[in-house]
């Protein structure tokens, strides 16, 4: 069997190319069916996301021309996108699939969305029946590998965006965010994004301050929060557990004396300032007060940077896991290759045995049941004893490089080749492999 | 002081009910040693966690702790049964160490049940190990007896005070964790073990709730002790070192609670106070060795 993969991703192709090759959710089932009907393709599935379009197929001896399929389906000149396309066969295709599901091929290494997207693509292909045997086993294995990578490495464990780092820090300070009050000072985009993240993680009420009350009201409406007039800022800011600032003010709005006042009114309950403004809205001195934690945009980005570095280090470990898994998968496939040979060898010998028993029985005349059993047992015993070594040799040969030679020799020695015509044999291989995989 | 001390100098020969010391009196010690072995896992976990967390230890530390406590409990119960009197068992210094360790661990379990964090174990496990270890090697048969030990007040005194100690110790550990966590958040560095500590407010709550819970125990424990002392030594018992230190500890404890309740002191200031209270508690404990009133052993 042969696995083939062709595709483009965010690294090999610009957005215009990915757009051109993307397949919408609605069209996906039909596209997958068309792929499965393409000459040489036995099974197939298509993953199409904003960052990648990948066609995965199992073909007979790698004979399917997937480039031609692309040309046909998208009605393009097949050579047009050559420089953006990558194509993998067997081992490389398996590794690529494993890397994609383990999110090692993602734009942000470790971001888990891609696993969900591949799972959806797999569900579509299964629903239309274009994934049903070996490709099914391979993709299922890829999901297992992805899970293994997630549990055994920390590749996806730390936050790598400013907003999610802010949420993490808030949780580090307050534990649960439920019932916490968030205050937005200024109405920038980043401010809004961070607030959204905090709300999604359970933060309670939101207050918005802006120099123009109108803008504050507009933003407050988006979150179901309250807009407050600017002159109340210092009198009510102590009610907030988390303050996000992003004003264009030239000097710091919150200074040490404000922080001291807030703490006194809050009875020293901690406060978290997220200062996204440049120049800064919160004086760094405020961070020196017990119980107030100030993170400016640089601090947050630095955390992001260290987390990204952590992820890259973990990604190396993840790559090792993927490589191991690829080797293991190949080894298993090879063992499966040997199964049909063993089966037909056993069938072959059983036919001979039956024929010989029938022949000898005619000459022996009437036998007692005990004698009958004895002949059965003896003939079976001889065959099993003789076959023991060849079968173990076949099994171990499957794990070696020259495995196919040994299999060939056995087939020729016992004349297994001519028993069935080629077409039939292919089918047997598949069903045996399926049986063994399930 | 001498006069009072004289009053409680105890018979130097074993009480008739205790003698002769039978072989099964060594059994509690065996169980205790088994418990110590299990607590050693906790000690290992605590040291490993601070430097480089070990998954394997994290997995076994809790079961090991549980098993250790079972053996520990058996040891305490059996020791109480062989000496024939509960209170008597508790007053030997070494055995009281064992009991204190048990109470502290029980308190830790309470916190764990509520907050699902092993972090206080960083302090609790080594202490429990040390206390039980000291108890398991230094334990002799009880060589003392006096009417004093028989009173229910003494038992109440010990049980209450120990719970108070446990609470104070946990609160102390929590304030250290709070400081570490606060510092790393301020320095904008969140790496290593600190990234696995519970949230700042959760640590704070653990510390405060322990304090709140421990205070009535400590208070009633001291009252029970005073009742006994008053009865046996008259009003002068007050001048004993141990008792003065205990009162000091209680006062700091109260200040700690008051500042917290009144102005929400936490973090550095609260940690200083907690440390002070803890030192007072340790000195009060250590005063066992030179206190007249509290010295029950006469050899």
Image: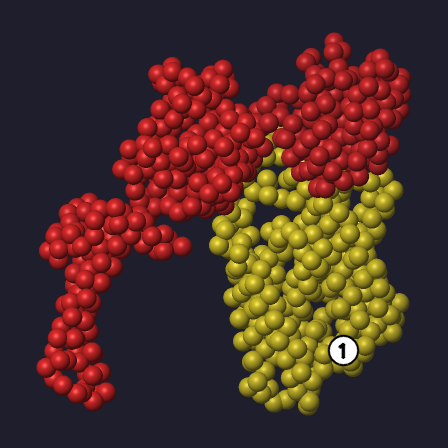
> Is B8 left, or right, of A420 in this rendering?
right
- The C terminus of chain B sits in image quarter: bottom right
Residue A51: in sight, yes or no? no
Image location of residue A27, percent across then percent down: 53, 29
The picture quadrant where one finds residue A241 is top right
Q: Residues within 10 Å of mark 1 (few under 14, many from 20)?
A: many
Colour convention: by chain
The picture quadrant where one finds residue A105 is top left
- Frontmost residue, B133 versus B142: B133
- Frontmost residue, B278 versus B33: B33
The picture quadrant where one finds residue A293 is top right
Residue A325: in sight, yes or no? yes
* Residue annotated with mark 1: B149
Image location of residue A320, percent across then percent down: 37, 39
Q: Is residue B172 above or below residue A383?
A: above
> Is A257 left, or right, of A354 in this rendering?
right
At x 89%, y 18%, the residue is: A229
- The N terminus of chain B sits in image quarter: bottom right
- Frontmost residue, A379 versus B2: A379
At x 74%, y 9%, the residue is: A250
Q: Is residue B12 above or below residue B111?
A: below
Q: Is residue A78 above or below residue A380?
A: above
Q: Give the color of chain B as drawn.
A: yellow
At x 19%, y 66%, the residue is: A351
Image location of residue A134, percent across then percent down: 37, 46
The chain letter corresponding to red is A
| Secondary element at tag 1 | helix
Q: How many marks?
A: 1
């Amino acid at each position: 069997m042969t696995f083939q993969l062709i595709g483009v991703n965010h690294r090999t192709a610009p957005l215009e190319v990915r757009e051109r090759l993307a397949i919408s959710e609605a069209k996906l089932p039909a596209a997958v069916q068309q792929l499965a009907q393409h000459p040489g393709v036995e099974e197939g599935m298509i993953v199409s996301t904003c960052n990648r379009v990948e066609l995965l197929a199992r073909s007979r001896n790698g004979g399917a021309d997937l480039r031609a399929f692309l040309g046909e389906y998208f009605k393009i000149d097949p050579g047009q996108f050559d420089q953006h396309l990558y194509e993998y066969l067997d081992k490389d295709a398996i590794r690529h699939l494993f890397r994609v599901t383990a999110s090692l091929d993602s734009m942000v290494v470790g971001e888990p969305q891609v696993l969900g997207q591949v799972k959806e693509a797999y569900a579509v292909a299964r629903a239309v029946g274009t994934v049903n045997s070996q490709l099914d086993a391979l993709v299922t294995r890829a999901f297992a590998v992805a899970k293994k990578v997630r549990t055994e490495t920390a590749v996806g464990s730390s936050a790598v965006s400013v907003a999610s780092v802010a949420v993490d820090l808030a949780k580090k300070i307050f534990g649960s965010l439920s019932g916490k009050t968030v205050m937005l000072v200024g109405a920038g985009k980043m401010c809004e994004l961070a607030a959204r993240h905090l709300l999604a993680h359970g933060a309670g009420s939101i207050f918005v301050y802006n120099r123009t009350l109108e803008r504050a009201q507009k933003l407050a409406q988006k979150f179901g929060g309250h807009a407050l007039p600017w002159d109340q800022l210092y009198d009510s800011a102590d009610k907030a557990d988390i303050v996000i600032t992003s004003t264009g003010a030239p000097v710091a709005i919150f200074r040490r004396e404000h922080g001291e006042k807030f703490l006194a009114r809050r009875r020293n309950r901690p406060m978290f300032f997220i200062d996204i403004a440049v120049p800064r809205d919160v004086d760094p001195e405020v961070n020196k007060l017990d119980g107030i934690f100030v993170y400016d945009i640089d601090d947050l980005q630095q955390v992001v940077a260290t987390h990204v570095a952590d992820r890259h280090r973990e990604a190396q470990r993840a790559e090792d896991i993927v490589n191991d898994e690829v080797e293991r998968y190949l080894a298993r496939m090879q063992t499966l290759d040997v199964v049909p040979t063993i089966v037909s060898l056993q069938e072959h010998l059983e036919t001979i045995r039956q024929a010989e028993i029938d022949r000898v029985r005619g000459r022996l005349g009437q036998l007692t049941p005990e004698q009958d059993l004895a002949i059965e047992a003896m003939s079976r015993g001889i065959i099993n004893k003789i076959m023991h070594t060849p079968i173990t040799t076949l099994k171990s040969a499957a794990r070696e490089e020259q495995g196919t030679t040994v299999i060939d020799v056995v087939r020729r020695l016992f004349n297994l080749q001519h028993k069935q015509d080629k077409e039939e044999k292919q089918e047997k291989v598949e069903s045996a492999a399926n049986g063994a995989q399930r | 002081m001498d006069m009072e001390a004289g009053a409680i100098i105890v018979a130097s020969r074993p009480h008739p009910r205790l003698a002769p010391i039978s072989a099964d009196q060594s059994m509690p010690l065996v169980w205790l040693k088994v418990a110590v072995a299990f607590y050693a896992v906790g000690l290992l976990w605590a040291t490993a966690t601070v430097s480089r967390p070990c998954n394997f230890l994290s997995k076994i530390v809790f079961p090991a702790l549980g098993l250790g406590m079972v053996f520990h409990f058996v040891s305490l119960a059996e020791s109480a049964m062989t000496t024939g009197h509960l209170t008597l068992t508790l007053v030997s210094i070494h055995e009281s160490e064992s009991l204190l360790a048990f109470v502290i661990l029980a308190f830790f379990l309470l916190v764990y049940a509520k907050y699902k964090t092993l972090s206080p174990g960083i302090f609790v496990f080594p202490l429990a190990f040390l206390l039980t270890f000291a108890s398991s090697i230094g334990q002799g048969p009880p060589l003392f007896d006096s009417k004093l030990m028989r009173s229910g007040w003494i038992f109440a005194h010990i049980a209450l005070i120990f719970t108070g100690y446990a609470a104070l110790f946990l609160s102390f550990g929590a304030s250290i964790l709070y400081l570490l966590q606060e510092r790393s958040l301020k320095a904008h560095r969140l790496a290593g073990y600190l990234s696995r500590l519970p949230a700042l407010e959760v640590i704070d709550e653990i510390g405060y709730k322990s304090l709140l819970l421990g205070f009535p125990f400590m208070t009633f424990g001291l009252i029970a002790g005073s009742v006994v002392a008053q009865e046996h030594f008259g009003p002068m018992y007050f001048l004993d070192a141990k008792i003065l230190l205990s009162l000091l500890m209680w006062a700091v404890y109260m200040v700690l609670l008051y500042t917290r309740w009144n102005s929400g002191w936490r973090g550095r200031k609260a940690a200083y106070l907690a440390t002070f209270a803890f030192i007072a508690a340790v000195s009060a404990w250590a005063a066992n060795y030179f206190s007249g009133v509290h010295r029950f052993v006469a050899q």
